[in-house]
Image (cartoon, coloured by chain):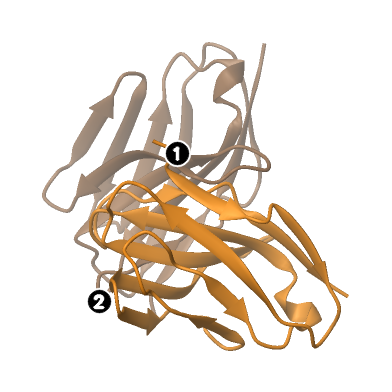
Chain colours: A orange, B brown
Amino acid sequence: NAGVTQTPKFQVLKTGQSMTLQCAQDMNHEYMSWYRQDPGMGLRLIHYSVGAGITDQGEVPNGYNVSRSTTEDFPLRLLSAAPSQTSVYFCASSYSMKSEQFFGPGTRLTVL
Amino acid sequence: SQKIEQNSEALNIQEGKTATLTCNYTNYSPAYLQWYRQDPGRGPVFLLLIRENEKEKRKERLKVTFDTTLKQSLFHITASQPADSATYLCALERQGGKLIFGQGTELSVKP
């Protein structure tokens, strides 16, 4: 089992560029989520999904899009990158919304 | 809105002592609370989950308490080791079932 995988590990973007952060899990988990982690702020939920075809917004969704076409994959799209989106992004999966979360290794994104 | 607070200052203790980390919350009564460990440059790793009807939960050298009257959870590591040095995050379930995370407390165990 690879668990939760994320690509890329590092990314530098210019303001206005778009990109997709990839997330995949091989544990057949229904629930997947994206968080961003900033110094002193803790983990903040961006978007989440309770199953294929179902997504919803978290507490900081602006500037991000998600889709869930399969159980395994949950990509996060930055539509037009801004310096405020410089952060470390974590994808997580779990059996249900209320059970232990399995986190990926993270993507460190810098927007210039 | 729900708020969760952890000690922002790093906790420095001597090897062999018990480390105690605090997690306080306001404006909500969660049905459960979780604790995670995070090492630098890595994703959080789940440690323990405690439900509102459980006062205490143990796993090896780890112990978590959950006081719904005080709105507080305490996380203890007994016989601490340098390998326990990490940042520890608490997370509580809020309305709708989603998790809200605290900012974490950095623990440093000196030999």
Q: Callout 1: helix, strand or loop?
A: loop
Please, is residue A35 above or below residue B56 in the view? below
Q: Amino acid at mark 2?
A: Gly
Viewer-side residue, B46 vs A79: A79
Asked whether A95 or B25 is in front, the reply is A95
What residue lies at 70% left-to-right and 65% top-to-bottom?
A87
Q: Is residue A70 left or right of residue B103?
A: left
Residue extending farthest front: A70
Per the image, the residue denoted by label 2 is B96
Q: Position of residue A26 (x, y in %)?
A: 36, 47
Q: Residue at x 51, y 17 (%)?
A: B80
Secondary structure beneath label 2:
loop
- Real-space Cα separation, disc 2 to disc 1, in angstroms: 30 Å
Residue B65, horizontal then vertical, whole percent:
28, 40
Q: Mark 1, chain letter?
A: A
Which image quadrant for residue B61? Answer: top left
- Report the disc number at residue B95: none
User: In the image, what residue type sits under mark 1?
Assistant: Ala
Left/right placement of residue A54 relative to residue A3 reads left
Q: Quadrant of residue A33?
A: bottom left
Q: The numbered mark 2 sits on a residue in which chain?
A: B
Front: mark 2 or 1: 1
* Residues under numbered marks 2 and 1 in contact, where contact means CB atoms less than 8 Å apart: no
Which residue corresponds to mark 1?
A2
Number of residues whose C-alpha sits closer than 10 Å to that of mark 1, classed few (under 14), some (14–19) or many (20 or more): few
- The location of residue A83, given as percent across then percent down, is 80, 79
The answer to whether residue A7 is left or right of residue B26 is right
| Residue sitting farthest toward the left | B53
Does residue B67 appear to the left or right of A92 in the view shown? left
